[in-house]
Image (tube, rainbow, N blue to C red):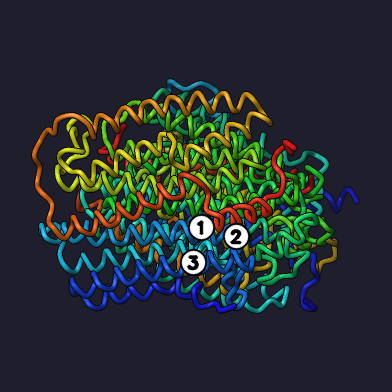
Amino acid sequence: MSLFSIDVGSQLVDLGSALLLLTCFAIVAQRRLSACVDLFVLQSVFLALTASLVAFLTGIHHIYVAAALTIVVKAVIIPRILKQVIEHVNVKRELEMNVNVPTGLLICGALVILAFFITQPIIPLGFLLTRDSLAIALAIVLIGFFMMIARKKAVTQVIGFLVMENGLFLGATAAAYGMPLIVELGVFFDLLVGTLIIGIYSHRLQDAFDSVDTSKLTTLKE
Amino acid sequence: MSSWPLVLLVAAPVIAGLGSLVVQQRRAIEVLQCAQAGAMLAAAALVAGQIIAAGEASVGGFLQVDALSAWLDLIIGFVGSSGTLYAVGYVGEELDRAHVSLKRYSQFFCLFDMYLASMLLAVNLENIAIMWIAIEGSTLSAALLIGFDRSKAALEAGWKYVILSSVGIALALFGTILVYYSSEHILGVSNEALRWSQLYRVAEKLDPVAIKVAFIFALIGYGTKAGVAPMHTWLPDAHAEAPTPVSAMLSANMLTVAVYAILRFKAVTDRSVGPEFAGKLIVGLALLSLAVSAIFILVQRDYKRLFAYSSIEHIGIALLGFGIGGLGVFAGAWHLMNHALAKSTAFYGAGLVFLRHDHKSLDRVTGLLEQMPVAGTAILVAGVALAGLPPFGLFISEVLIVAGSYTIRPEVAYVFLALLALAFATLLYQVLRMVLGEPGEAGTALGRQCRIFTSAAVGINIVALGTIGLRVPPGLETLLASILKIFGVGMEAPR
Amino acid sequence: MMLQAITLVVAQAIVLLAISPFLVGLIRKVKARFQCRRGAGVFQPYADLAKLFRKQPVISTTTSWIFTATPYILFASTLSAGLLVPTFISQTPMNFAGNIIALVYLLALGTFFLILAGLDAGSAFGGMGSSREAIVASLTEPAMILSIFAIALTAGSTNLSTIVHKTALMEGIVTDPSPHLMALAALCIVALAETGRVPVDNPATHLELTMIHEAMVLEYSGRYLALVEWAAGLKLAVFLTLIANVFAPWGIATTLTPAAMGIGLVTYILKIAGLAMLIGTLECMFAKLRLFRVTDLLGVAFILALLGLVFFYILRG
């Protein structure tokens, strides 16, 4: 606390959140699957840095644990699983999307505004240090959600889900100064298992349908 | 007061599940599962007994049971037990026919028990964030169970389920974070700020806007898991493609657990901003679910999907009860229990039909009462109960909800009655057509062991359904009265 | 006072004119190194320019006066734009002459004439280059204006000198980093597109299918080509200066003492040389986008700039 004034601190936290948002846009605009995974890693690293910054500025030490877990789980293990899945399903890039890139970005821009609009009345509740993070966190959650709708390939849908999780984590650490440690641990465990299961599903979809294009899943209709 | 029944309730399925994975031997697994079913049932009854006597119970501030939790314990414990018996028969038959290997057989029971355990854990936790973790756990185990057949259709259904539920549950987590965001200023940055009991206590001091936004996120999130329209699209596919014991558990237990999570958030929201806000949202979504399900029940050509849409309908009815509040809470809780019993019975019957004929087409199934007495009885009794005819509990709860909504908003009652009539007529017609008449195709006869286990499961369910259908037992009445207290008054107090 | 101002203007013009071929050479050198070539020396572009100035130009008989006038207009407009941007001193003497918006339009004027000149010769390549340049220019313009507005809003002024001066002195301008970050990202994309660098155009290629800028200037030779090339270098220098000094003005001379100006000059050269090396590195890492994908990239820039503005209003709201 003594090293930084609260003003500079909050600016740095804001900067971290903004970098997270920026990587979100990059992922939305990116067609190559492995580049999407790399960008997700970058985003997770930014997330860990922002979380550590909050931990440092507030002196709440268990956030460091969460940041370290973010690095281990989201920047190392999950990308490795995803790369394996990409290798197995042999899809390098997404040629068609449900929404083209510029339109997608415009929608994301609108989502950011929506997020600010929703959180505006409750932002003053938050801690002085991390005022704007809640809005950005919600924006990232919404963009992740959008990504799951806009993309057709199973792998990019997973990345959308993971981006949502990053947004949630930013909300939990930056806006709310971290959930209790047991909660963080549980969430990470669920996330890891969830990604594994989704990975297993992508494998089986590839084997059964010869494709991970989820728009080909049309067996079940009314 | 001793806390071991509560611990046993959560621990029994975990132990049995891990045991099944380890022993990999058919007889041993069967014994383990039967023991698990018995232990779960006994523990649920004991916990409920404790709550009826003492009001609440807890284990080390981690597990905490009040009347609502005990109600859910009873539902999941009972239906879980009969479901376990049914699964032993059903998956055993699949094993006999060499549809699954012994390894997959033991994997199935491990997942099945973990699924039950995570749901039992979810309803007995006091911490809303850890409850989220448990519910996510149930989502993940259910995802593997739905795709268990590995057919194209099952994979597709499983994929839809896992993706939609993950999104839903992520939104629910955001709602949870928002609650924490507003409560930590009063209760401190600690676990305290996530406890139900503490949240109830300080609800009036929480920021109303934050709580409203949080409730909306929780409603959409857990609503997705409860199969509330318009987030219901995963539900018919998952129910139709999952192995039938799993379909029964999805419908009877998991939807109920999701409703439970919504109710916990509603209780906080009601204390913070009054019952109007949450009530209106819930009533709106409930009516939408009713409308969607009534229409799709009409056009169904697949009997498992028929029952799946009926689940959307009944969850909608229960939510409508909770939404209007007051007497409706009583009716909603009663409806949840009866629906769980009736719907699991219906799926038990449907599963037997599927095992025999290996197709799910409604048109090709007739004369069940003659051909398969157990399945026919199950589907007939469940169908009559689900259509809301006396002497079953669903009749009472529906009448109460109509009465409750009429005193508050007559137009809600009219819409409700119209949709109910539509679903009633279609469901009853289809069920009667299935069970009566001349049997069609012969199909493959079921093994003896399968018949014993599944008949036991169906029998237990029908006996329970009939017993509580005629009148509410005094113990359950005490529980319902306590649940009513959690929610306070209705949208506009009728009295 | 007047004399001092004129001296400074001349000094700035000389710095810009002198450094721009160096930047081009530096980028080429970095790229060569990444491609495991030795490459030409960083001062090669000076020799190229000198050679071109000595050569006799050949002018097609089908061209009009626009063709011969364009290199001068382009050169003059780009240089005037450069004079509006603070380079090594934060208070440019020319700042009375125009603000950030004038800068955008001076650059657009040059582009406009270059497009006309490309069409003027009537060759297929020239026309193709011009139409492509028109697409790119029309898409970058909104993004550029918006990102510059986002910066102007946070600084409370559209005058570049004021923006840079205030930021350099840390006079409470950067209260929220988010709008700045978005604008920076947008402006970087705009800069790459406007100066014809890699994901949009490749200055090293003469392949018909892909070239944009090179196609437009295909008909030029001799001193006209020299002027066009020099102007292109100048434009690059202007953009790099803009990015360096608006977002990281630290080190720039805020007073007119010789020592401060000396430090300012050195840090300025280091900063834009660093940026040029970054561009060289990026050009080796990324492939050029297909022309129809360029709209995606510029769409990104536009959205980012828009978000910068939105952030500004919401955070201040």
N-term-proximal mark, 2 vs 1:
2
Q: In this view, does B376 lie to the left or right of C8?
A: left
Instruction: Examine the image and state in which quarter residue C209 appears.
Output: top left
Q: Is residue C282 left or right of residue B410?
A: left
Q: Mark 3 lies on which chain?
A: B
Q: Which chain carries label 2?
A: B
Q: Which residue is drawn at 76% across and 62% down?
A: A127
Q: Are marks 1 and 3 in contact (CB under 8 Å)?
A: no
Q: Distance between the residues labelled 2 and 1?
A: 9 Å
Q: Residue at x 22, y 56 (%)?
A: B90
Kind of residue at disc 1: Leu
Q: Which chain carries label 1?
A: B
Residue C31 location in percent, x, y?
Answer: 42, 60
Residue under label 3: B121
N-term-proximal mark, 1 vs 3:
1
Q: Is residue C284 visible?
A: no
Q: How far apart are marks 1 and 3 (CA)?
A: 11 Å
Residue B235 location in percent, x, y?
Answer: 39, 43
* On screen, residue B154 above or below B292: below
Mark 1 and mark 3 on one chain = yes
Kind of residue at disc 3: Leu
| Label 1: which secondary element | helix
Residue C124 location in percent, x, y?
Answer: 36, 26
Mark 2 and mark 3 on one chain = yes
State the quadrant of the C terminus of chain A: top left
* On screen, residue B237 above or below C67: below
Residue under label 1: B72
N-term-proximal mark, 2 vs 3:
2
Residue under label 2: B67
| Label 3: which secondary element | helix
Residue C315 location in percent, x, y?
Answer: 75, 49
